[in-house]
């Protein structure tokens, strides 16, 4: 029984590591001068950045070229998308109800 649980845990850890590596390719920061010329990020940009926030955070510890949060955003809607994306990723309030 313990072998099955260990095997299942190893598979889940491997899948999690693979997901982190794949998501790391999406974490990028735009040059601030280029940000001012482009359209600001809105709700969908915030949602995406919220979903990849943990990966962006880890990479930002080692690289100055990656940031967790878009500087060029439209304010409230970007913030709402960011919080919603992070909430979806971490299970929101559903864990509290168990």
Image: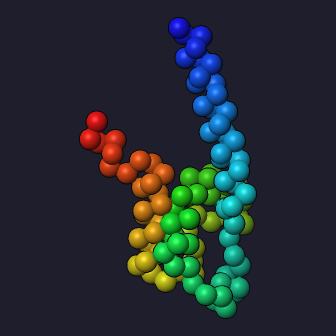
The residue at the point 41 percent across, 47 percent down is 91
Q: Is residue 30 above or below residue 7?
A: below
Q: Quadrant of residue 48?
A: bottom right
- Residue 65 appears at what percent x and percent y? 72, 66
Image quarter (top left, top right, bottom left or bottom right) of the C terminus:
top left
Q: Is residue 61 visible?
A: no
Label total for image: 0
Look at 43% across and 63% down and name the residue there.
83
Q: Nearer the viewer, residue 83 or 60?
A: 83
Q: Position of residue 46 (x, y in %)?
A: 51, 70
Q: Is residue 30 above or below residue 24?
A: below
Q: Residue furthest left?
A: 97
Q: Is residue 72 above or below residue 62?
A: below
The residue positioned 51% from the left and 79% from the top of the image is: 42
User: Can residue 80 be spotted in the picture?
Assistant: yes
Residue under the image location 69 percent in, 54 percent down: 24
Q: Is residue 77 left or right of residue 10?
A: left
Task: Tell me if residue 94 comes above or below residue 86 in the rendering.
Answer: above
Quadrant in which residue 31 is drawn: bottom right
Residue 32 x/y as whole percent: 67, 82
The scheme the figure's colours follow is rainbow
**Spot occupied by residue 95 in the image (x, y as percentages of width and height):** 34, 41
Q: Residue furthest top?
A: 1
């Amino acid at each position: 029984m313990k072998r099955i649980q260990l095997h299942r845990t190893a598979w889940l850890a491997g899948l999690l590591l693979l997901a982190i590596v794949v998501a790391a390719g999406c974490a990028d920061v735009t040059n601030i001068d280029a940000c001012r010329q482009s359209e600001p990020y809105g709700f969908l940009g915030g949602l995406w950045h919220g979903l990849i926030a943990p990966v962006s955070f880890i990479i930002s510890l080692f690289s100055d070229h990656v940031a967790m949060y878009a500087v060029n955003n439209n304010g409230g809607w970007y913030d709402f998308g960011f919080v919603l994306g992070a909430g979806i990723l971490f299970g929101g309030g559903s864990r509290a109800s168990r």
